[in-house]
Structure formats: C-alpha cells, structure tokens
Amino acid sequence: MSLDRDDVEKIAHLARLALREEDIARYTRNLADILGLVEQMEAVDTRDVVPMAHPLERCQRLRPDEVRN
Amino acid sequence: MAIYKQTLTALSAALHDGQLSSEELTQIFLERIRQFDDQLNSFVTVTEEAALQSAREADRCLQAGNAAPLTGIPLAHKDIFCTDGVRTSCASRMLDNFIAPYDATVIARFKAAGAVMLGKTNMDEFAMGSSNETSYYGPVNNPWDTGRVPGGSSGGSAAAVAARLAPGATGTDTGGSIRQPAALCGLTGLKPTYGRVSRYGMIAFASSLDQGGPLSRSAEDAALMLNVMAGFDERDSTSVECPVPDYSAGLDNPVAGLRIGLPKQFFAAGLDAGIAGVIEQALREYEQLGAELVEISLPNSELAVPTYYVVAPAECSSNLSRYDGVRYGYRCADPVDLTDLYERSRGEGFGAEVKRRIMIGTYVLSAGYYDAYYLKAQKLRQLISEDYRRAFDSVDVIMGPTSPSVAFPVGERFDDPIKMYLSDIYTIAVNLAGLPAISIPCGFADSLPVGLQIIAPYFEEARLLNAAHQY
C-alpha cells in the first residue's frame, strides 16, 4: 500500500496531530510498511463471516433510568 | 533467605505470624528501590510517605487479627491505573502533570484488601510497545542484563518484581503486555479473560482488548492477587457477572489426564532453536506429570498480527482523542486558535509510536477504508476466535512459547516498528479472542529467561493457575 506525503498530512489533520516537517518522511514510510503488513488480511475470504466487535457475546448492560449518585 | 527474596505468599504468612511488621517490610522494599532503581528506571513515581502510612494501618489490622491475605503486602502498580491524588502518567508527556482524581477499581480493591502501594511503574507510552522503550521517562532495563529490554508494555512492573523491588505488581495486557515482559524477565504473568477484571479507571488503549492482571514470581502469588482483582464491577460496562472462584483453592490438583494442545503453527520453522529446546523440555515435564500432548491446528494464526494492527490502532485512535489540551494534561504554549491548540498539544504531547498508531487507526476507520480494513479485521477476529473454540473441544489447555526471542538489546528494534510488532506473534491472538492466558518461567536460552505460555478457555483462570503451579 503506498501512501504519499499528502495522505499522511490529511490523516494527521483528521487526528489533530501536528507533525514536524523533518518527521513526515519517516512517518510516511512507517505507515506504508504497517499498511503493507496489514494487507495480508486480503488473503482470506470472509464473505460469510460475522464481524466480531469484542469477545463477549453480550449486549450493552442496561439499568432502569433512575437517578443515582 | 533474605526477606525481599521471599514470595508474596511467604511474606503474607510472615506478616500474619508476626515475624515482621508491614512497616518494616515496606521499608525494606523502599530501600531496595532507592538503591537499585537508578539502574532499572522501573518506577515513575514512588509513594514513600503514603506507603508507610498504609503499612502502619495494615499493622493495626494484623495486630487486631482481622487482616486479609494481602494486608500489609507492598505492591507496585503500572502507571496506567488511576490512583487518587497520585500522578498517573501512562508514561506520556501528555499526562505528566495529571493527578488522578479517583482510584481505578483495581487500585480500590487492593486498598480494601489492605495492600500497600509502593508506587507507579514505568511502561511503554499509553501501553503501546513491546520493549518499554517508548516511555517519556526513558527506557526500563531488564534486571537479567541491563543492556537489554524487559519487554513491554508492562516493563516497569516486570523489572521491579524480577529485581525484587516489589513482591508483586499489576500490569495490563492488550497484545501481550503482561505475558511478554513476564517471559523476558523470568516471571509469572497472567492475562485474565476479557471482562474478568474491571477496566474502570484503567486508562484505555484498545477497549475490546485491554485487561489488567498480576505479575508475580509464582502461580500461588498470582492467585492471591487475582482473588483481589477479579470480579464484577457495575462501573465497567464490559465487566462480566461471573462468580469469582477462590483461585488459591485448586492449585494442588494433579494434572494427570490434562490434555495439552500444541498448535503446529507455534512450533513452525522460524522459532529460535534455543527457545524451542527449553519449551520441549517443559512439555516433557508435563508428560511426566501425566498430561497428554495433542497436536492441534490454529489455521488462522498468521492473521493475528495484521488483524491486531488494524483493531488496536483503530480503538486507540478513538480512545486517545480525548487528549486535547483543554481540561487536563499537556497543553502547548501560546496556541493561536482551537485547531492549533489540539494539533500542537497532541503533536507535542504524544511520542512517535503513539502518533503512528493513532494515524493508522484514523486511516482504517476513515470513510472509504472502514470496510476494507476495520470490518475485515473484525471478521478475521471471528475466525481466529473460532479456531480456539474448536481447539478447546478436544484439549483442556493450549501451550507454546510466549515470545519468539529472549530479551533483545535496547535499541535493536526501536527503529523498525514491524520487527517490534512481531515480538507479539504468540500472544496477540489471545487478546483478539478474549481468552485467559499465563506465561510462566520454564528455563533459559543464552542465559536469558524463557516463558511458556498456557492458554485456557473463557473464565478458566483456575485451570491455568493449577497447570502453572504444578510445573
């Protein structure tokens, strides 16, 4: 996955992170490498798989709408 | 044997028998910290006065005869747990000035149990790292060889316990951050089932993966600590209402007949020969105790690292968006407008690894990429978890190496994020599935500690501790 400087600047802005000029090249390389690692996910067919948001098969626990301190 | 070399269990007995007081015991550890922590840098904050005060209170309970097992025992806590009135930094410049206004549930439970807090331990910044080199307060050194890393992110807790600066410490584990430092420092480190230990007051990194747990020198000690830490907490919406057994009770059960699954993917080519040898020997020991070794397969194992490096950064980018320089934490000097306030407070307050992960997370959650990355990762997470569910149909526990290498030299992987990420190759899937796992010391390779990882089904921490204790 290739990322260029513009992509990194856009991401940094979305995340509200000011990056120093001298660091941008390094971050661009790092992010591209990490996204390259992540691309291994493409190898698997997951069309019929249900996404798993977290380990517990539960719903958000609710309680009556009463005032408590 | 010198007092500080004794296990937590032995120290508890010593206090209850009146062999020494908690105040004396606490002074011994505080003195060791003063003497040795310069070489290790394992503590961010040492709470000497408060520790001695709690120790005196504990002594009153011990004398009155209404003390609990951990009453008067000094412990260290990872600087990720909010501690009322005490700096809670997450080893970040962003929270260097943050004094927590409340106690995390884990901290409150230890206080209620009468334990004494020695201080807050160093860690990788915001729990992101596998070597404790990303801390704002400088790296932690491994007591086994101070030119090497202790592992991360709970490196400070691991180094402190390994160097006998504390008989036990708390850590957190999101991708291996209790187990891997335990392995590199020759300790017992337990990551409980997701939902077993309350995350209230535990500064969030990845909310669907984080779990707090004990680092100690034995399974017996870990059981004592887990007895205090575990339990439902209504203030944590992911906390589970599952009864807490007495983890100390089943430790002596024999392991004859225990079916141990060995995933062929964990023993593939590429595993360091020295480590493989030590692990094989440990497995023979279990066979001698009557356990049965069964080869199993976890076919989606290789996807654990890429899946994790989508899910964890995504969740971290959301959790860390609260650090904005407004109400607390680091604020940049002379902001010209709101955007500048946010961008420079965060840009200057966070270290490089944290910024990298926030950016990856932001990217994978952004419009146009969410399906390809985050949703895909959640589906892989399902597949990875199903591999384990299926495996546990035919085995009782799964074993393998905790870490692909022994403690590596400081600086060796710092500039190569991918190499650093691969340190977690055996631990990460466990967090994705939410299963409990423990790392126990099982020998040495190149004179450095090697850890054996044991994984159990959901809420079977007692089974883990029993297997660990029997070894």
Image (tube, coloured by chain):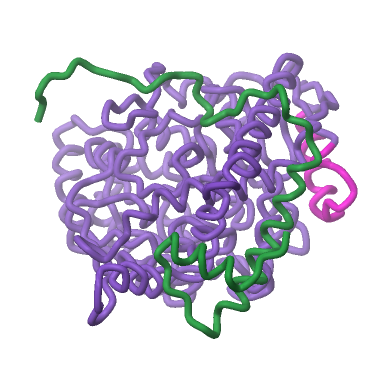
Which chain is green in the rendering?
A: A
Q: Position of residue B26 (x, y in %)?
A: 29, 56
Between B433 and B24, the one nearer to me in the picture? B433
Between B293 and A9, the one nearer to me in the picture? A9
Residue B412 sits above or below residue B462 on the image:
below
**Magenta residues?**
B265-286
The quarter of the picture where the C terminus of chain A appears is top left
Which residue is rendered at x = 74% and y = 39% of the image? B400
Answer left or right for B371 relative to B295: left
Q: Main secondary structure of the magenta part?
A: helix
Residue B225 sits above or below residue A3 on the image:
above
Residue A32 sits above or below residue B379 on the image:
below
Q: Position of residue B189 (x, y in %)?
A: 54, 44
**Residue B277 is one of the magenta-drawn residues:** yes
**Which residue is most to the bottom?**
A22
Q: Position of residue B414 (x, y in %)?
A: 63, 71
Query: What color was chain B assigned in the picture?
Result: purple
Answer left or right for B430 relative to A53: right
Which residue is rendered at x = 68% and y = 67% of the image? B408
Which residue is rendered at x = 69% and y = 26% of the image? B388
Residue B40 sits above or below residue B83 on the image:
below
Answer left or right for B441 relative to B300: left
